[in-house]
């Protein structure tokens, strides 16, 4: 799997820049992004839908091993549950694909409520 730079993601990254992140989700810093990118490459094997698909980490949950990745070809978002185990086989790591930022934000707000944020819209 390759992670070309820059990643062609249409306007997804610009849209994500406007998101108001709420616990348990937060935007990640460069060092963490590199670590998540490397782990995704290590875990995704031939036969997995993300194998050989350009991807870059963007955000993560503090209460789980879920990471939001920007995807290219075609542009999309994926929440991937990293296992931190190189022995995984498809369909692991499990993932959910979101075609739009709005779809992801709706899921994020549900995660916020599950996390205990009673003020989440």
Image (cartoon, rainbow, N blue to C red):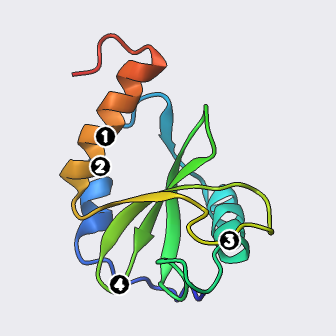
**Mark 4 Cα within 10 Å, few/some/many (few <14, many 20+)?**
some
| Residue 104 numbered tag | 2
Task: State yes or no: discs 2 and 1 in contact (Cβ < 8 Å).
Answer: yes
Question: Would you say 64 lies left or right of 38 here?
Answer: left
Q: Quadrant of residue 118?
A: top left
Judge depth for marks 4 and 2 and give the one in front: 2
Separation (CA) of disc 2 from disc 1: 5 Å
Judge depth for marks 1 and 3 and give the one in front: 3
Separation (CA) of disc 3 from disc 4: 27 Å
Between 99 and 20, the one nearer to me in the picture: 99
Separation (CA) of disc 1 from disc 4: 24 Å
The answer to whether residue 19 is visible is no
Regarding mark 4 in the picture, which secondary structure is present there? loop
- Residue that badge 3 annotates: 89
Task: State yes or no: discs 2 and 3 in contact (Cβ < 8 Å).
Answer: no
Q: Quadrant of residue 88?
A: bottom right
Please state the horizontal and vertical placement of residue 17, each as a whole percent of the image: 32, 54
Instruction: Examine the rendered structure and indicate whether residue 71 appears above or below residue 117.
Output: below
Please state the horizontal and vertical placement of residue 110, each as a whole percent of the image: 32, 29
Residue at horizontal 68%, vertical 71%? 89
- Residue that badge 4 annotates: 8
Task: State yes or no: discs 4 and 2 in contact (Cβ < 8 Å).
Answer: no
Judge depth for marks 2 and 3 and give the one in front: 3
The answer to whether residue 26 is visible is yes
Separation (CA) of disc 4 from disc 2: 19 Å
- Residue that badge 1 annotates: 107
Sequence-wise first label, 3 or 4:
4
Between 17 and 46, the one nearer to me in the picture: 46
Task: State yes or no: discs 3 and 4 in contact (Cβ < 8 Å).
Answer: no
Sequence-wise first label, 4 or 2:
4
**Mark 2 Cα within 10 Å, few/some/many (few <14, many 20+)?**
some
């Amino acid at each position: 799997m390759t992670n070309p730079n820059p990643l062609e993601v249409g306007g997804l990254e610009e849209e994500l820049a406007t998101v108001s992140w709420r616990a348990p989700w937060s935007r990640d810093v460069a060092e963490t992004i590199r670590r998540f990118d490397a782990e995704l490459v290590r875990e995704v094997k031939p036969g997995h839908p993300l194998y050989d698909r350009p991807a870059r980490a963007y955000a993560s949950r503090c209460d789980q091993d879920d990471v939001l990745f920007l995807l290219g070809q075609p542009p999309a978002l994926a929440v991937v549950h990293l296992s931190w185990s190189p022995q995984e086989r498809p369909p692991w790591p499990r993932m959910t694909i979101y075609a739009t930022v709005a779809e992801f934000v709706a899921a994020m707000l549900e995660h916020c409520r599950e996390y205990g944020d009673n003020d989440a819209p």
